[in-house]
Amino acid sequence: MGKSILGFSKLSKLKKIDWILETHFSNKENAKRILIQYWNSNEKLQQLHDEFIENTITNYYLPFGVAPNYLINSKLYTIPMAIEESSIIAAASNAAKFWLDRGGFKAKVISTTKVGQVHFMYHGDFDVLKTYFNFIKLQLINDAKPITKNMEQRGGGIIDIELKDKTKDIKGYYQLHAIFETLDAMGANFINSCLEQFAKTFKREAQHFDAFSSEEKDIQIIMSILSNYVPDCLVRAEVSCKVEELNEDTNISPEEFAAKFIQAVSIAEVEPYRAVTHNKGIMNGVDAVVLATGNDFRAVEAGVHAYASRNGKYRSLTHARVEDGVFTFWIEIPLALGTVGGLTNLHPLVKLALEMLGNPNAKKLMQIVAVAGLAQNFAALRSLITTGIQQGHMKMHLMNILNQLEAKNTEKNTLVEHFKTNVVTHNAVVEALDDLRLTIDD
Ligand code: MEV
């Protein structure tokens, strides 16, 4: 049974750890050793990490890997990926190599605007509210100038504000629905600051708007917040080649490969149970790059899945066709990403990841991330319709099992060789390791 504590955040890091050990662990020494072994010996770096969040007690490592050979719009990239799932980087690298020999990836940004909303309640005549909105709209924009000035100088800012009547959904519910261009910033702080200013002005000036009755003046602001649904911050990535070029390393003909591949995609276009897994595979690639480049993967996830169900049914984000003997496979995906602000200037590994990508602007990063998603989906479907997914997965998982069993390096080498021609299962690895140890003991 746990216990509660007041003022935990005020304790020093060591005192916090002491409390946690005391409250939750029987083997305190072991728990403390595990927590402390992840501290960075560079105190400045550790302090930086401590201060990212509240109540930091240690660091949580994810592997940071790279997938080379990504030819995107005729330029070669090595893509940094932070991810724990064993097969993802291998899949990313294989797909990159496959398409490198077939013209690479083409990507283009379709749109870049984002939305934020002030949600409010008003109980009065809609026409009077509309008149007030049209009267106050310019002042909403002007009062936000101190926030928008810099962004405007760089070519971004507030694109428009609309008044939306949502009373069909909730009695008295309206919105200021604002559209923003935030350029290379993800823009969450910028958008939220603008919205909070709109809300202040909107409520304050209502007091002085003569056409309102005293009841109508009483506009109640519920909340002001950006939307992570970004269907107009959209990027498209694509690969294509002649069908006969699809024949490498598979146990089926190029024509059969193309036909099965297109069927697999169309299944994900009509069947939500499959579509969720299909899109999860895409997000394996997307999230890994989003994380490595210091972006908000929860925002991306939420926005992407909402987009996948925009027509009322959850569907595949990728599509495929054969036309005139040419196989084309593409993705359209909403991605609100930043390459300035947030973690991008703060986290040394994020800075390094961005430098590895040639310090892209947000539009370039959108293209790279969309490509990583498309490539990951290509690799997954390629395995699924040929060898099945487990062959590759279990090969990659082998190292995790060996580590779990505390195999020595020499044992690992022998068993990796052994499992090149044998099926990997947890039991099979346990038995093979036991046998190996017995033969060595003999
Ligand atoms: C596993 O992380 C992802 C896959 O399930 C994706 C898919 O089925 O397309 C392999």
Image: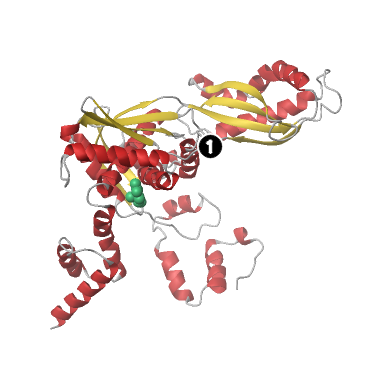
Above or below, 116 relative to 402: above
Q: Is residue 5 left or right of residue 114?
A: right
Query: Looking at the image, can residue 361 be seen?
Result: no
The quadrant in which residue 394 appears is bottom left
Q: Residue 348: image x %, image y %?
A: 39, 45
Which of the 4 image quarters holds residue 250? top left
**What amino acid type is highlighted by mark number 1?**
Asn
Residue at 72% of width from left, 16% of height from top? Answer: 135
**Vertical placement of 284 versus 1: above or below?**
above
Please report the residue visible at 27 percent of the width from the left and 40 percent of the height from the top.
Answer: 261
x and y percentages locating residue 246 in the rendered image = 18, 37
Residue 343 versus residue 414 in the image, above or below: above
In the displayed structure, would residue 301 be above or below residue 31?
above
Quadrant in which the N terminus appears: bottom right
Residue lying at 35% horizontally and 31% vertically, measured from the top left: 367
Percent position (x, y) of residue 404?
Answer: 31, 68
Between 434 and 81, the residue placed more toward the observer is: 434
In the visual, does 418 lie left or right of 24? left
The residue to which callout 1 is attached is: 228
Instruction: Choose between 31 and 159: the one closer to the eye.
Output: 159
Disc 1 element: loop
Q: Quadrant of the C terminus?
A: bottom left
